Image (cartoon, rainbow, N blue to C red):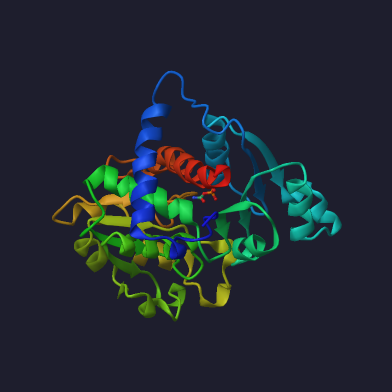
Amino acid sequence: VNHLLGIKYLTKEDIDLIFETADQFKEVINRPIKKVPSLRDITIANLFFENSTRTKLSFELAEKRLSADVINFSASQSSVKKGETLIDTVNNILSMKVDMVVMRHPNPGAGVFLSKHVNASIINAGDGAHEHPTQALLDSYSIREKLGSVKGKNVVIVGDILHSRVALSNIYALQLQGANVMVCGPKTLLPKYIKDLGVKVETNLKKALEWCDVANMLRVQNERMDISYFPSTREYTQQFGVNKELLDSLDKEIVIMHPGPINRGVEITSDVADSKQAIILNQVENGVAVRMAVIYLLASKIKQ
Ligand code: CP
């Protein structure tokens, strides 16, 4: 397969190979000279139809660390605003001899759609509320780094599961690696199909935290929210926000994760987000090595 469209399409062996490759790149980017010449003959376009800080900059840095040529496209400043279609936009970019496309798009399935209509390797950098595969890979990589392995660990994903591409990709990735997965959130923010995914469901945060080794706190996605089924922010924070007092009431120290951007004081308080228990910035750091691995492995197939 010449694309990374979702974790759904990967095997456990694929993830193992990505992580072994990322281990090598993590070592490289901690050297004084952080670059390797591997992809001098590859050109990559980063197409962002939705806002991003971490994913956009992390992909760009990963590509530059691999010595690829990089072009960046932001839909809001492009001819998409004049009505140009997705396929026309991408085919015009590809005609400039581009080999690989990294795309974030608000529509679920946009990456799969594009992969069927254009001749390039596609990496999904987040498609609506569907998948965010490189986020899930860097999340699992960070758990593996912190706890030694993902297999057998109890991981709870907390919050706005309904609108979260991070949740779905994490569920697939964690299950492939043998973790036990729970979701915890208000019933209004759990999708109807959640039990079909083979995860435990809990609506009491304290019970969920007592069960888990790792809690991945999701951002409440106000921009995708239908206000009629959202508990008020104050109610949400009272019932599903993690704070130091709650963590101190547990009989063990759990690992706290967050994909970012954080709503400080809503799903997580600053004293937790900035504590030693939180590996939020380690996740961001690992994102570069994991994305280098994904790009490198896909590019090696282009070169064949
Ligand atoms: N985690 C994540 O996708 O963050 P950005 O939206 O800033 O890329």
Which residue extends farthest top? Answer: 32
Which residue extends farthest front? Answer: 304
Q: Could you say which quadrant of the image residue 25 lies in?
A: top left
Q: Where is residue 217 in the image (x, y as percent from the top left)?
A: 38, 57
Camera-nearest residue between 13 and 47: 13
At a point 55% along the width and 41% down the height, the residue shown is: 59
At a point 43% along the width and 74% down the height, the residue shown is: 190
Q: Position of residue 92 (x, y in %)?
A: 79, 50
Camera-nearest residue between 126 and 118: 118
Count all numbered tags in the image, as a single digit.
0
At a point 84% along the width and 60% down the height, the residue shown is: 83
Q: Is residue 248 left or right of residue 137?
A: left
Q: Where is residue 125 in the image (x, y as percent from the top left)?
A: 56, 53
Camera-nearest residue between 121 and 83: 121
Q: Where is residue 50 in the image (x, y as percent from the top left)?
A: 64, 54
Q: Is residue 203 left or right of residue 229?
A: left
Q: Is residue 282 left or right of residue 207?
A: right
Tell me, yes or no, if residue 270 can be seen here: no
Query: What quarter of the picture does the C terminus occupy?
Result: top right
Q: In this view, does 122 lie above or below 22?
A: below
Tell me, yes or no, if residue 88 can be seen here: yes
Which residue extends farthest right? Answer: 82
